[in-house]
Amino acid sequence: MTKTAFLAGLAALTLIAFPGSGDAQSRGGSADAPISFGANSGEYAGDTVTLRGAAELTQGQNRFRADQISGLNTRGGDSRIEARGNVYFVTPTQTIKGDNAVYTTANDQIVVTGDVILTQGQNVLTGSRLTYNVRTESARIEGGSGQGGRIRGVFYPQSNGN
């Protein structure tokens, strides 16, 4: 594989990592920001780019990191990114942590599985599977066998200054 082919594949992965026109991106001021990446190693094979070892994609204030991140471009222009091990998706207002994640650009959804933790400020929600829409910032969480099939959460009411 040539250096040019590797860099082209890496560019394709970074371009698919974050939605370019979604409302969530615009609110975070990230839609027009450059996309940067880092990892201990990377490879490009066919239509797939893989970053290994402290892999990270950053655009503006949004960050997606994991032990390994792989991206695949489909013929229809949609893409699929898979992250494995110590997954974090961080926006200016929320942090999602899990064991594995799959981000699909066709529907702007990230499905995070394993020991899932969603935090927003002091609020915390845990479960085994989280489906999060990056554009609408909506989330659905499910419990699993590790927590007796239940989800758990702690929410702090907003103070009105009284």
Image (cartoon, rainbow, N blue to C red):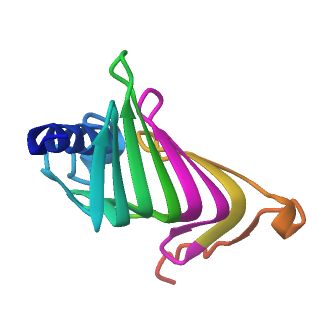
Task: State the image quarter where residue 128 is shown.
Answer: bottom right
Check the image and name the residue furthest to the bottom.
Answer: 162
Check the image and name the residue furthest to the left.
Answer: 4
Please tell me whether residue 41 belongs to the stretch shown in magenta: no
Residue closest to the eye, 69 or 61: 69
Quadrant where the N terminus sits is: top left
Q: Residue 99, how many percent across, how many down?
A: 59, 63
12 on left or right of 105: left
Residue 95 visible? The answer is: no
Magenta segment main secondary structure: strand
9 on left or right of 145: left
Query: How many numbered circles are shown?
Result: 0
Q: Residue 139, how many percent across, how many down?
A: 59, 48
Check the image and name the residue furthest to the front.
Answer: 1
Please tell me which residue is depicted at 25% across the width and 61% down the height of the picture.
61
Residue 87 visible? The answer is: yes
Please tell me which residue is depicted at 32% across the width and 36% down the height of the picture.
22
**120 is higher (above) or lower (below) than 82:** below
Check the image and name the residue furthest to the right.
Answer: 148
Please tell me which residue is depicted at 53% across the width and 78% down the height of the picture.
122
Instruction: Give the magenta-colored segment's residue range.
Output: 97-123
Residue closest to the eye, 154 or 97: 97
Residue closest to the eye, 9 or 76: 9
Q: Residue 107, how many percent across, how many down?
A: 48, 29
Q: Residue 4, how many percent across, how many down?
A: 9, 40
Please tell me whether residue 113 belongs to the stretch shown in magenta: yes
**44 is higher (above) or lower (below) than 159:** above
